[in-house]
Image: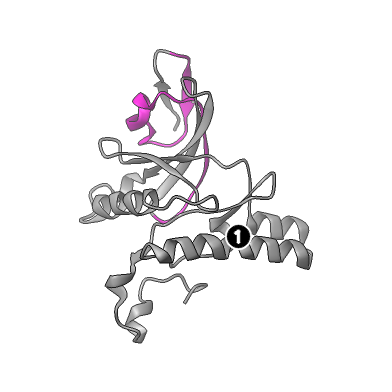
Amino acid sequence: TPEEVTLSGKETYAIPVTGWGRVRELMLEHIEHIGGGGMGDVYVGFHPDLDRKHAVKILKEQYRQVPGAKESFAAEAKMAASLDHENIVKVYDFRRDYLAIIMEYVEGQNLEQMIKKRKSIPCKEAVKIALQIARALEHAHERGVIHRDIKPSNIVIRNDGVVKVTDFGVAKIKRVLASYSLDAFEGYSPLYA
């Protein structure tokens, strides 16, 4: 059932996901649920003071009491915030009190949506996309971060063609993966492993 939420003394919005009420103080207007996955739900909202949209990833309600889940979510935010590259979605803030990661909102579609819609991507365009993904991963790897969940739904293509890698939820720091045994692939998405 929708929860009535008033944000920053503005209009009241019916938010269809419980737990969103924790983010009332983030000063966002016109909130809309745009996706989600593993541990989080993602919303977009307009920040009137900054005159731009932000994406907000919130830890799902069912994980808030799971041992280690809050720490993993905070580690994802910290890891992603350590990466500053044009092809990686920027993390602006982490609100521990709300268990919310405030990120750059990317106007466009993910690669999975693009493939489903268009059925095929011309070779030249596919190479441009792949090169931008490779640059993003190179940047992450140079900083000791391994994404571990590269798949079409975690690649967003902005309306102007710029590619953004997102969702570092299962990323690991390289030094943790010192072994090259099969155990090193534990936790990878099947598409990556």
Query: Which image quadrant for residue 117?
Result: bottom right
- Which residue sits at x=31%, y=75%? 177
Q: Quadrant of the N terminus?
A: top left
Query: Which image quadrant for residue 145?
Result: bottom left
| Residue closer to the observer: 18 or 143 | 143
Percent position of residue 78, x then y = 32, 50
Query: Left of 59 or right of it: where is 153?
Result: right
Identify residue type, mark 1.
Gln
Residue 140 seen from this side: yes
| Residue closer to the observer: 85 or 31 | 85
Q: Magenta region: which residues?
A: 10-38
Query: Left of 87 or right of it: where is 68?
Result: left
- Which residue sits at x=28%, y=71%? 175
In this rendering, the count of numbered labels is: 1
| Residue closer to the observer: 191 or 63 | 191
Residue ID for mark 1: 132
Say if the magenta span includes residue 12.
yes
Percent position of residue 61, x then y = 33, 44
Percent position of residue 5, x then y = 41, 23
Q: Is mark 1 on a helix, strand or loop?
A: helix
Spot the residue most to the left: 67
